[in-house]
Image: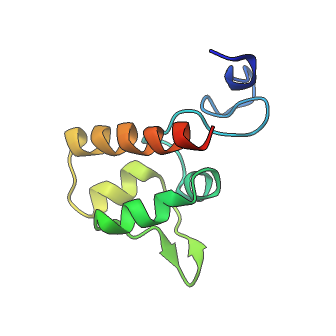
Amino acid sequence: MPPNLQLWEGCGHQNETKEGTIDMITRTMTIEDLVQAVPEAVTYMMRNGIKCLACGEPIWGTLESAAKEKGFGDEEIARFERELSALTSKEH
């Protein structure tokens, strides 16, 4: 892994790197962190029926809570994690 993508230990966010960019999306990420790190996540989530913005601002909660609210199960949430993480790799 390149040095600029190594995880920043002790920052409190396991998916935040030293530069503040995200290299892996997890179900426990807040929607706010997700859309700030990966703006394309808004379109992705809307296509999958998950509301992530209200009045132009990210909704409260995590990726997992937003997905479960729409009836998605653990396997589908794991797919969201993988596909959203793939979007982050396209940005680097």
Q: Quadrant of the C terminus?
A: top right
Write down the quadrant of residue 46 in the picture: bottom left
Write down the quadrant of residue 3 in the picture: top right
Q: Quadrant of the N terminus?
A: top right
Residue 6 on image: x %, y %:
68, 19
**Residue drawn 34% across and 45% down?**
80
**Residue drawn 31% across and 66% down?**
47
Q: Residue furthest right?
A: 19
**Residue drawn 44% across and 38% down?**
86
Report the coloring of the rendering: rainbow
Is residue 3 depicted above or below 88 in this figure? above
**Side of 36 where 55 appears, left or right:** left
**Side of 69 where 36 appears, left or right:** right
**Residue drawn 59% across and 80% down?**
56
Q: Residue furthest bottom?
A: 55
Is residue 71 depicted above or below 80 in this figure? below
Is residue 22 depicted above or below 72 in this figure? above
Residue 5 on image: x %, y %:
68, 25
Residue 87 on image: x %, y %:
48, 45
Number of marks in the rendered image? 0
Residue 28 on image: x %, y %:
47, 42
Of residues 60 and 92, the one nearer the viewer is 92
